[in-house]
Amino acid sequence: MKGGQVKGGRTRGGRLNAGLLAGGTLVGLVVLAALVSFFWTPHDPTLVDAAGKLREPGGGYPLGADKFGRDTFSQLMVGARTTLYVGVVAVGIAALAGVPLGVVAGMTPRGWLSELIMRVNDLVFAFPALLLAVMLGAVYGPGTLTAMIAIGVATVPAFARVARAATLQVMVTDYVLAARAAGRGRPAIAVRHVLPNIGSVLIVQASVSFAIAILAEAALSFLGFGTRPPTPSWGRMLQESQELLFSTPRLALWPGIAVAVAVLGFNLLGDGLRDYLDPKLRRIRAEG
Amino acid sequence: MTTYLLKRLAVLLASTAVAAVAVFAFMALLPGDPAEIALGVNATPEAVAELRRQFGTDRPPVAQFLDWSGGLVSGDFGTSYVTGAPIGPQIAERLGVTVVLVLGGMVLALALAVPLGTFAAVRHRDPLGVAISAASQVGIAIPAFLAGILLVFVFAVRAQVLPSGGYVPITEDPGEWLRGLLLPWLSLGLVQGAVLTRYVRSAVLDVMREDYLRTARAKGRGAAGALWRHGLRNASVPVVTVLGLQLATLLIGAVVVERVFVIPGLGDLLLNGVAQRDLLLVQGVVMVLVAAVLLINFVVDVAYHLLDPRLR
């Protein structure tokens, strides 16, 4: 049904589609900015320069500077790094915890374990990332780490549900029946048959979750529960820009565009991957 | 249906109870002692012990939990360690503001999404239909608080027709109350409307391919009539599910939007509580928000069953 099968004389997967290309380009842009920022930025993004306070764009400062004289362009580049870092760790936590739980629940659909996993899942689902981050922040102090953990834990249910739904579909296929008839144990079936066949659903989910993680990180940093100064982050740039909205609106414009580009990119990439990897995947929609 | 309702109600109560344990356990893990925090570093051990007794934090955790959760049932959230004021009335007052904010955003989102999504589905090959789809993709990529900042820029900084923030109670001046809420409603409604438009579009597209719609057309109904009579109710099933999820998202989005517009809602109360380390207050607000999410999920599940007779 899925996997590397030949369908109607053509191997699975589609041609590159517009969403995939557009999403890939936008995500590529963000990744490039983050990678380049490790080696080069126009200026030190944390360098406070009283003389260059609210410097207008131009003359080596393509997007101008903020109220501390920090170069907006450099801050955006390093901010991309923060965004991707939070996204990778949060989605990583969610996938590492959610996928095994979902696969186990999907392989034993009528067992007590499955019931327990899904009930706990529903409960975690009632704790949005923002609430978890605020609670964690109240206990351990706000920061990038607590934000990543909060977003990651809050995303576990989405992965578990999608992994379970996909596993349920794989479990009724003939090849799994054959493997069971041949006496293969459950762990072996999970590794040999289930995981490879639900991989593409999970990749799509990862992309969609990444977009949501970026939104969550921006909101948390905006509230002061995310990345701490002086590390640049788009959300905090937005928060700092708000008081200057009447005099210097461009300070809100650029980080705003950056957040929108990154989220749009990962959403389009997710949709594009869904169509590219397997048109049948449209049946199992990625969850928010 | 009654059996289903009772079963689902039991699940709701059980998960709320477990959530209460989780919230309490999490906050009880706190390294700080509320009495020590309240008195500062120079307090004598006797004074700390006395305050601990007053707060009730000298008792075993289980007793504290039973006391706290027992109070919750009757709306008693305890007394703030920091201000000494009862927490329940504060939450009740703020909850009203947040609910108005969320419901206004939801109504706006629906008013945008149902016509736009249906139109985008019916005309999915037209440039205009494609443009609506594309616009909704962009809308999804903009967080509500960013939409708020942009709206403030357009309507408060440039056009200067609406206030950039602040909140006037409806009892004081209904006109100003409305003016103050317009931009926050728009911030939440535009973004959620974009998300919802996509779901309405794909749900309507799905029903348009159904045989019963073709049958209705064959029996002489016009395209609009067939969709109206036979399509929209069927399309509403997946939309209601998403609507529920969105309502929970809106509630959390409202917490952030309240910060943008300086609106004294639950989010504002929560964040101030964290800033002042008013932990019992934080515990209470978190519990209310989590219970609200659970309640929304309950209502969505029930609505789902009412709308789709096949599930009964």
Image (cartoon, rainbow, N blue to C red):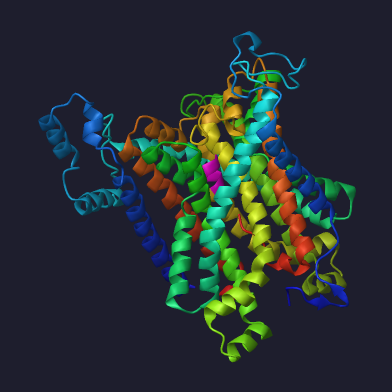
Residue at image location 25% in from the left, 36% down from the top: B34
Along the line of sight, the residue nearer the viewer: A269 or B219: A269
Q: Quadrant of residue A262?
A: top right
Can you see residue B196? yes
B57 displayed left or right of A22: left
Q: Is residue B10 above or below residue A24?
A: below
User: Which residue is most to the top?
Assistant: A51
B63 displayed left or right of A187: left
Residue at image location 71% in from the left, 24% down from the top: A42
Q: Is residue A93 above or below residue B163?
A: below
Q: Position of residue B61 (x, y in %)?
A: 22, 51
Predominant secondary structure in magenta? Answer: helix
Q: Position of residue A266 (x, y in %)?
A: 70, 48
Along the line of sight, the residue nearer the viewer: A268 or A190: A190
Residue at image location 28% in from the left, 51% down from the top: B69
Q: Position of residue B33 (x, y in %)?
A: 24, 37
Can you see residue B299? no
User: In the image, which residues are magenta?
Assistant: B249-253
Q: Is residue B36 above or below residue B13?
A: above
Along the line of sight, the residue nearer the viewer: B82 or B298: B82
Which part of the image, by quadrant, shows the C terminus of chain B? bottom right
User: Which residue is most to the front?
Assistant: A39
Is B286 magenta? The answer is no
Q: Is residue B274 above or below residue A64?
A: below
Q: Position of residue A204 (x, y in %)?
A: 68, 59
